[in-house]
Image (cartoon, grey):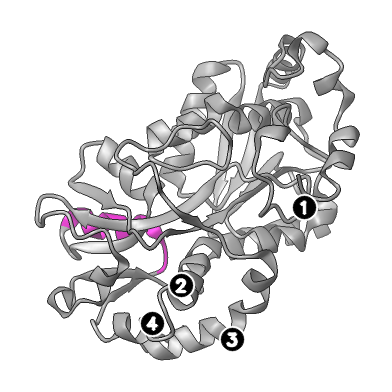
């Protein structure tokens, strides 16, 4: 358990822990009733909108008295919006889920003390603060068009292979926290020459995972470095896309989800977070999106190997290396903003 987490647990609203019969239940009746009275919550999210809508539907099926409204924007843009609204006293969101956990640290003063009832079951190693939780885990795998090509070999070397020149989609290094984790993995794990080897194959560059996954589905590229939850959510809807899990490991970026101190709907916010971080909520992410989880006991996506290796960059390197390495990556790939 990360330092200060025990203190955070003690500071969490007595409400969640004073009911001994439901201490490990994500959603005690008193909380559900209070949330239902509020009737809604506003979620700010950097997660792909289609995915958030799927999860909001799962939550509403469980708690029909609480409506989830979603404002979605890329991580950097969302961070700027939160800063601007908070400075003007106009921040009306209840919960935020940022894909870049170190961005969330910069606005730590805006977050309420919070920990879910099942906090002890979470791998908290990568949490930047004790009240920001990895509700979502953004994991990259190799997606491919299942109608056009056979499953590629389970190795990241596929996107360096000249036989795939001009047919590969790659996420921009500076597009967000999860993309930055992938970029770090390529250099630190796959080797110093990996960026150039990929760039030499004339990949198509994308600013986000949604359009890149759609390009795979349409056959504009035959394979791409895509978040599992983005690609598999489309597969579950019948699209010709699937993933393989490279043997070298899967780069991942835990999200940072928290409740704002001045949340207009604090009970609905707590209910949403409790459910999202419960085994039921995490399994909804796995089963409905093909995502993954840092919660002990959560399921894995169908088809994922039992010995799957998740690679998460250390918080200090995640922050310190970003600017200089992204500049190098941009130069290597010939990308200009």
Please count the marks in the image: 4
Mark 2 residue element: loop
Q: Are marks 3 and 1 in contact (CB under 8 Å)?
A: no
Which comes sooner in the sequence, label 2 or label 4? 2
In this rendering, would 98 be left or right of 220?
right
Instruction: Name the foreground residue: 155 vs 60.
Output: 155
Q: Which mark is in front, 2 or 4?
A: 2
Is residue 175 shown to the viewer in this render?
A: no
Q: Residue at left 78%, top 34%?
A: 264
In this rendering, would 156 be left or right of 38?
left
Is residue 221 a member of the stretch shown in magenta?
A: no
Mark 1 residue element: loop
C-alpha separation, residue under disc 2 versus residue under disc 3: 18 Å
Q: Which mark is in front, 2 or 3?
A: 2
Is residue 206 shown to the viewer in this render?
A: yes
Q: Which mark is in front, 1 or 2?
A: 2
Circle 2 is placed at which residue position? Answer: 189
Crowd tier of the residue under label 3, counting other residues whose Cα lies within 10 Å: few below 14, some 14–19, many 20 or above: few
Circle 4 is placed at which residue position? Answer: 195
Give x and y (percent) for residue 228. Answer: 38, 49
- Magenta-tinted stretch: 207-218
Furthest-front residue in view?
307
Give x and y (percent) for residue 40. Answer: 65, 27
Give x and y (percent) for residue 112. Answer: 83, 42
In this rendering, would 158 be left or right of 85?
left
Which comes sooner in the sequence, label 3 or label 1? 1
Q: Are marks 2 and 4 in contact (CB under 8 Å)?
A: no
Circle 1 is placed at which residue position? Answer: 129
């Amino acid at each position: 358990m990360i330092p200060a987490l025990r203190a955070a647990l003690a500071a969490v609203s007595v409400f969640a822990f004073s009911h001994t019969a439901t201490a490990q239940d994500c959603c005690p009746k008193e909380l559900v009733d209070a949330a239902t009275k509020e009737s809604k919550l506003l979620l700010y999210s950097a997660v792909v909108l289609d995915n958030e809508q799927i999860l909001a539907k799962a939550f509403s099926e469980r708690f029909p008295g609480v409506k989830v409204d979603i404002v979605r924007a890329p991580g950097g843009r969302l961070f700027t919006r939160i800063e601007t609204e908070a400075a003007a006293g106009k921040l009306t969101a209840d919960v935020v889920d940022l894909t870049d956990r170190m961005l969330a640290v910069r606005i730590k003063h805006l977050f309420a003390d919070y920990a879910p009832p099942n906090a002890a079951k979470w791998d908290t190693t990568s949490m930047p603060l004790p009240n920001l939780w990895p509700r979502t885990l953004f994991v990259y795998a190799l997606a491919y068009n299942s109608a056009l090509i056979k499953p590629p070999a389970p190795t990241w070397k596929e996107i360096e292979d000249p036989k795939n020149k001009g047919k590969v989609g790659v996420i921009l290094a500076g597009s967000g926290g999860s993309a930055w984790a992938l970029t770090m993995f390529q250099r630190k794990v796959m080797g110093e020459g990996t960026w150039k080897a990929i760039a030499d194959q004339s990949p198509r560059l994308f600013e986000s995972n949604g359009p890149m996954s759609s390009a795979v589905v349409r056959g504009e590229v035959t394979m791409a470095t895509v978040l599992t939850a983005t690609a598999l959510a489309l597969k579950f809807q019948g699209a010709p896309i699937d993933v393989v899990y490279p043997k070298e490991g899967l780069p991942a970026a835990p999200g940072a989800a928290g409740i704002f101190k001045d949340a207009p709907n604090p009970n609905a916010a707590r209910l949403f977070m409790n459910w999202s971080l419960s085994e039921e909520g995490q399994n909804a992410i796995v089963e409905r999106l093909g995502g993954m989880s840092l919660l002990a006991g959560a399921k894995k996506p169908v088809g994922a190997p039992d010995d799957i290796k998740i690679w998460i960059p250390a918080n200090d390197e995640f922050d310190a290396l970003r600017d200089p390495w992204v500049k190098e990556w941009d130069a290597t790939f010939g990308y200009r903003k």
